[in-house]
Image: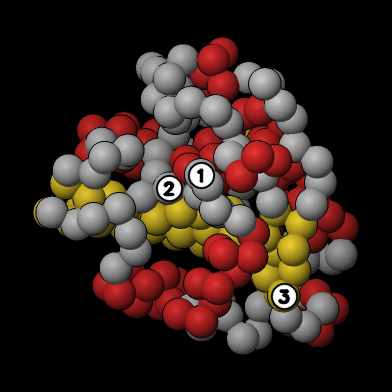
């Protein structure tokens, strides 16, 4: 098992110039540099981008629907790294409503879990094919108030990694904590990000 070193790639102008941050969390087997290339399809020229890198290119070793204990200590270490990243951005004077979180696949699962454990207002959450982590979701693990944070959450039907049922559970929990969720289920979609998903994300990114 493993933990994660703090290794964060950045792109764009400094925070003191942009006043807005997008944290981008890569999927299993990928890299911070690879998720940063998604900027070419997103309206983020006026954002400072942050992309943490997972040790061993994976945030945790097993499926996100395995018992959480099987994914320790990597899972807690990954959550702590996201926490530290967001705290560093806030320490630069950026308010929560100007911080956006994005993840794909395993990165979307980690992002959803991080944000929902301590819900607060963000500019938006862009969860491309992901859901909350664990074999059985325990609502007592999640608290706080999203304060109408817009959330995009997607998956395919079927998806080889993220079942529709887990997305539905995730939506219910996030809405109970005050998120405004846009859920998109795509019949027969491969494990990827569609242009329609990017269009919705860009609409959210341009609202602020």
Which mark is in front, 3 or 1?
Answer: 1
Q: Residues within 10 Å of mark 1 (few under 14, many from 20)?
A: some
Judged from the image, the secondary structure of the residue bearing numbered disc 3 is strand
Residue marked by disc 1: 28
Distance CA(mark 3)–CA(mark 2): 22 Å
Residue marked by disc 3: 11
Distance CA(mark 3)–CA(mark 1): 21 Å
Q: Residues within 10 Å of mark 2 (few under 14, many from 20)?
A: many
The mark nearer the N terminus, 3 or 1, is 3
The mark nearer the N terminus, 3 or 2, is 3
Judged from the image, the secondary structure of the residue bearing numbered disc 2 is loop
Q: Are marks 3 and 1 in contact (CB under 8 Å)?
A: no
Foreground pick, 204 / 9: 9
Drawn side of residue 167 relative to residue 142, left or right: left
Foreground pick, 53 / 128: 53
Q: Are marks 3 and 2 in contact (CB under 8 Å)?
A: no
Residue marked by disc 2: 105
């Amino acid at each position: 098992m493993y933990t994660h070193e703090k290794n964060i790639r950045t792109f764009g102008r400094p925070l003191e110039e942009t006043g807005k941050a997008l944290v981008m969390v890569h999927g299993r087997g990928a890299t911070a540099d690879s998720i940063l290339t998604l900027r070419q399809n997103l309206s983020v020229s006026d954002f400072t981008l942050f992309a943490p890198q997972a040790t061993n290119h994976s945030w945790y070793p097993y499926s996100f629907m395995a018992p959480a204990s099987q994914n320790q200590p990597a899972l807690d270490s990954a959550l702590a790294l996201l926490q530290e990243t967001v705290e560093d951005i806030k320490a630069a004077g950026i308010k929560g409503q100007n911080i956006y979180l994005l993840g794909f696949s395993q990165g979307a699962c980690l992002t959803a879990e991080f944000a929902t454990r301590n819900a607060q207002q963000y500019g938006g959450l862009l969860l491309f094919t992901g859901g909350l982590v664990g074999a059985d979701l325990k609502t007592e693990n999640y608290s706080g108030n999203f304060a109408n944070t817009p959330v995009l959450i997607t998956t395919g039907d079927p998806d080889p990694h993220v079942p529709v049922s887990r997305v539905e559970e995730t939506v219910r929990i996030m809405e109970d904590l005050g998120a405004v969720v846009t859920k998109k289920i795509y019949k027969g979609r491969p494990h990827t990000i569609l242009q329609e998903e990017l269009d919705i994300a860009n609409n959210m990114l341009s609202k602020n």
